[in-house]
Image: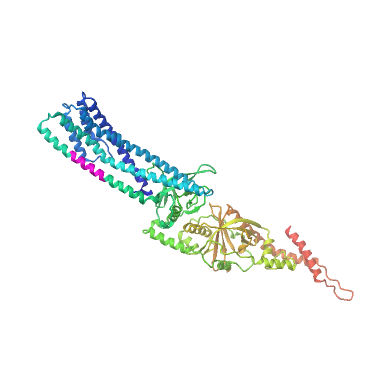
Amino acid sequence: LIVTDELRITTRSLLGVFEEDTAAISNYCTQLYQAMQRIYDAQNELSAATHLTSRLLKEYDKQRFPLGGDDEVMSSTLQQFAKVIDELSSCHAVLSTQLADAMMFPITQFKERDLKEILTLKEVFQISSDDHDTAINRYSRLSKRRDNDKMRAEVVEDVYTSRKKQHQTMMHYFCSLNTLQYKKKMALLEPLLGYMQAQISFFKLGSENLTQQWEEFLATIGTSVQNVRREMEEEVRQMQQTIQQMERSCDPLYAPCDPDPAHSPVCRNLTRKQGYLYIRNKTGLVSSSWERQYFFTQGGNLMQQGRGEVAGGLVTDLDNCSVMAVDSDDRRFCFQVTSFDGKKVVTLQAESRKDCEEWIATINNISRRIYLSENAEELAARVNQSALEAVTPSPSFQQRHESMRPTSKGRAGRASSISSVGSEPSPALSVLSLDALVAPETPIQFDIISPVSEDNSGQSKTAAQSGRRSNPFGESGDNTAEDTEDSILHQLFIVRFLGSMEVKTAESVDVISETMRQILAARAIHNIFRMTESHLLVTCDCLKLIDPQTQVTRLRFPLSSVVQCSSHQDNKRLFGFVLQSAGGRSDGRAVCYIFESNNDGEKICDSIGLAKQIAFQSEMVRPDLEEQSRLIAASSRPANPPASDGQFLVLSNSQSEDSDAGEEGKKRGESEA
């Protein structure tokens, strides 16, 4: 059978035992061949050569054959042969022709044909294995940016051919190793049988007792050899049929990727997995290399084992870790595993998309410690089904977002509401407390449903056309566009929307990190890779998500509703903020939004915090400026002198407005200075 990845290490070890046994057989057969060659060549040394042969047969039990050391029948038979050869060693004279035909020919055939065939098949198997590794490396180095259909087809065909060739040579090599166990018995028994028959036919000098005794024994041995030969031929025939059936049935398995994904769906309920992966190793500050290793999960750990190693080594702890698919410039099907403390990040590459998704699902199940339960796969199936229901997009997301907008124009009373916390929860929090922050069944919105038009644009144009003067203190109401244009802070960032979900509390510092973990895990489980790119505009009044092509505002978040904002502790691209509902903190309803930026997560959070501080300072300074403005206006305006006819002189409305405008411009300049 084709060995799977989980049995490959065992197969390699078993193959080593067979190769060691083959080497021992070859060594022993060479010694026996030299002894028989000495009998054939040296008629004068026939006694010494016969004695040496007898001694070698007696030492069969001392030979350490890994597969045949406990064959008592074979050992006892050889001991009897050794005894009779020792008795006849003083009177043997061998005819060269009979010895060449009956003794030297079988052992020469075994040594020159069978043993050399094993060595040749071993070299061919090693060459095919090296070609397969080369083809796999070439296939894994296919660049996603320079994707070429012709080149990819050639590489896939190369992998198919090399893998099929390796499989064929491996099966023939294993078949030859198994056949050798039968041939070694014949190679040892047939030369001895021919030798004894030659001795009997040559001498005709033995006594009747000796002849009758050993003829019966030799006939029994000859029958045994024929039975072993028939068993070997039957075994070889069955193995040949099995090889042909396996070649026909396993033809689709030679391709590195499954041409029909529906034929082999992704299994997301695994709590154990093993197989070959590529791991990225840093070789310098900006350079890295990829190495192919055998990886397997053991409890809550990810292990790796190289070729020739007896046991695996620890790669990282998977308990409470995070895993997500990542895009690599030079590799495909990559995913990244981050330890629970964020100190270790491992980047791995699978052979296919299915394998990558199964690794991600398995590590997610292990991260949740599902493997500790009795029915781990059943529990994983229920958890994945709950996750599937939890991440179903809600059609009422836009309505829920509209309800989150506060109606008042007041700004936050404290600038310290923006907190820069890490991505990991505090040590005091347990799993139950994290679930209290974000409910597992809370729906997740992965995309912005529809853009929101700027309703204030018409109002801005109307106000501009009316010719009314602007109030520097914001007393004239509801023109948001003018507030944005007059804002001191204007910062624009490129962000990508990852998802949002409703949270139970906005006060905890760990709610953003827990929301990040659940959204990234849900994206990895359900293979959601698409992200909406927007421009995030940070002002002292609000946060805006603007379409980069149409410049239409998709979403608007009043700055007064932003309760807290933080970035990921290790991945500086990730950040998020929490919006409190319009009803305030009494109802406890809040929504957490998660984004990805170009390594500007901390900078965006600092910008939002600066905007909150500016807004807070404006709230504190604005009442004093209004009071001072009214006092300056009252003191600088002269009293109306009475007219000559006893009436007062009243200024026209236009003159009054011009005067006020002058004073306002003067005070605005002083305020700005």
Where 438 sits versus 274, above or below? below
- Residue at image position (24%, 38%) is 186
| Residue at 37% over, 41% down | 125
Which residue is nearer to you in this view: 20 or 415? 20
Return the x and y of residue 134 as percentages of the image width and height.
Answer: 44, 42
For this orientation, the residue located farthest to the right is 644
Q: Is residue 467 above or below residue 673?
A: below
User: Horizontal and vertical percent for residue 522?
Assistant: 48, 59
- Observer-nearest residue: 417 or 6? 6
Magenta residues span 221-234
Residue at 46 percent across and 46 percent down: it is 155
Q: Can residue 499 be seen in this view?
A: yes
Mark yes or no: residue 291 visible. Answer: no
Q: How is the image coloured?
A: rainbow
The residue at 47%/54% (across/down) is 322
| Residue closest to the eye, 542 or 402 | 402
Q: Is residue 227 magenta?
A: yes
Percent position (x, y) of residue 219? 16, 38
Point out residue 59 in the picture as x, y percentages from the top left corner.
23, 33
Q: In which quarter of the image is residue 11?
A: top left
The question of residue 467 being in magenta is answered with no
Exactly how many numbered labels are in the figure?
Answer: 0
Farthest left residue in view:
208
